[in-house]
Image: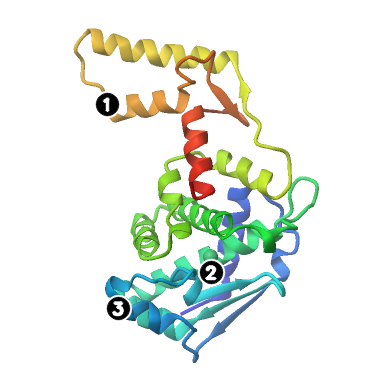
């Protein structure tokens, strides 16, 4: 059963993740349509393996965000039907649809540091818009420790057109990096990467730790490699890069940027 509180907690979590201010988001309308079956829904399930040839992914068929009047609509009947076809819990599917649509709304209407919204939201590419809706849904579900919902989100993505899947190529990545890209797409400052002496030092200690393990024939753990990846600079470069206060490698920045632009 849908409650207004689900909507509000999704808004609060996504605002925290994006570091945007509420702005007009509390005034957005949230409607549940209990009777209609949305356009494109039947078609989605007629395709073999539930793949859709539509430009809209299943999440934007089960619900939608309409930027022109700041409205989110959920199709309760189709969500129930879809959940049973996918052998998923109706509540879980509804939660994911809510996160996806609220992520559209928050990235559009949330206020940046200068109280600006995403003014060119309507002209942004489907790759950009869906990348942010999906990756912030992913971050939010990870944050509430719902691996089962992350799994369902990923499964729905794999049944949807490529702009809905691109976040899968971007993760794992720090949310600060995605925030930097979003800020740039919203018309703010370009993502700033700052070289840092202290990060270069961190990196060199992570590297020597790894080299020591190799020298002693000790096993290299996934954590060792992950630590190195997060701190790794360009191989021929002169230090790690920083996004905000976070060390992020050039390779990660490029991977996320390319996923976001659908390249
Ligand atoms: Zn969408």
- Whether the residue carrying mark 3 lies under 8 Å from ligand 1 is answered with no
Callout 1 secondary element: loop
Q: Which of the two discs, 3 and 2, labels the residue nearer the N terminus?
A: 2
The structure residue drawn at horizontal position 54% and vertical position 56%, both measured from the top left corner, is 127
What residue is disc 3 on? 85
Residue nearest the observer in this picture, 184 or 202: 184
Residue 138 rendering spot, x and y as whole percentages: 46, 54
Q: Which of the two discs, 3 and 1, labels the residue nearer the N terminus?
A: 3
Q: Quadrant of residue 41?
A: bottom left
The structure residue drawn at horizontal position 55% and vertical position 82%, both measured from the top left corner, is 32
- Residue 133 shows in this picture: yes
Residue nearest the observer in this picture, 147 or 107: 107
**Front of the two marks 3 and 1:** 3
Residue 123 rendering spot, x and y as whole percentages: 68, 61
Which residue sits furthest right?
114
Q: How far apart are the alpha carbons under marks 3 and 1?
A: 40 Å
Q: How far apart are the alpha carbons under marks 3 and 2?
A: 24 Å
Callout 3 secondary element: helix
The structure residue drawn at horizontal position 60% and vertical position 17%, both measured from the top left corner, is 196
Which residue sits furthest left?
217
What residue is disc 1 on? 221
**Is residue 113 left or right of 235 when viewed as pictured?**
right
Q: Quadrant of residue 45?
A: bottom left
> Dot 2, crowdedness within 10 Å: few (<14), some or many (≥20)?
some
What residue is disc 2 on? 6
The structure residue drawn at horizontal position 78% and vertical position 52%, both measured from the top left corner, is 116
Residue 29 rendering spot, x and y as whole percentages: 67, 76
Res 160 label: none
Q: Is residue 211 above or below residue 123?
A: above
């Amino acid at each position: 059963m849908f409650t207004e509180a689900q909507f509000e907690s999704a808004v609060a979590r996504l605002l925290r993740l994006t570091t945007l201010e509420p702005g007009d988001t509390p005034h957005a309308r949230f409607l549940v349509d209990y009777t209609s079956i949305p356009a494109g829904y039947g078609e989605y399930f007629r395709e073999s393996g539930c793949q859709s040839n539509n430009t809209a992914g299943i999440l934007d068929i089960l619900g939608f965000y309409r930027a022109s009047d700041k409205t989110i609509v959920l199709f309760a009947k189709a969500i129930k039907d879809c959940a049973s076809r996918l052998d998923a819990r109706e509540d879980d599917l509804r939660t994911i649809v809510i996160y996806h649509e609220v992520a559209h709304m928050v990235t559009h209407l949330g206020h940046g540091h200068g109280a600006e919204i995403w003014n060119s939201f309507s002209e942004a590419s489907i790759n950009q818009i869906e990348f942010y809706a999906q990756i912030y849904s992913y971050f939010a579900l990870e944050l509430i420790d719902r691996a089962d919902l992350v799994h369902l989100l990923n499964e729905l993505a794999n049944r949807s057109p490529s702009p809905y899947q691109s976040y899968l190529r971007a993760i794992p990545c720090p949310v600060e990096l995605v925030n930097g890209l979003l800020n740039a797409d919203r018309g703010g400052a370009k993502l700033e990467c700052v070289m840092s002496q202290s990060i270069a030092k961190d990196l060199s200690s992570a590297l020597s730790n790894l080299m020591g393990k190799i020298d002693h024939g000790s096993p290299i753990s996934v954590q060792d490699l992950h630590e190195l990846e997060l701190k790794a600079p360009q191989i021929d470069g002169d230090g790690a890069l920083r996004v905000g206060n976070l060390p992020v490698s050039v390779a990660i920045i490029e991977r996320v940027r390319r996923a976001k632009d659908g390249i």
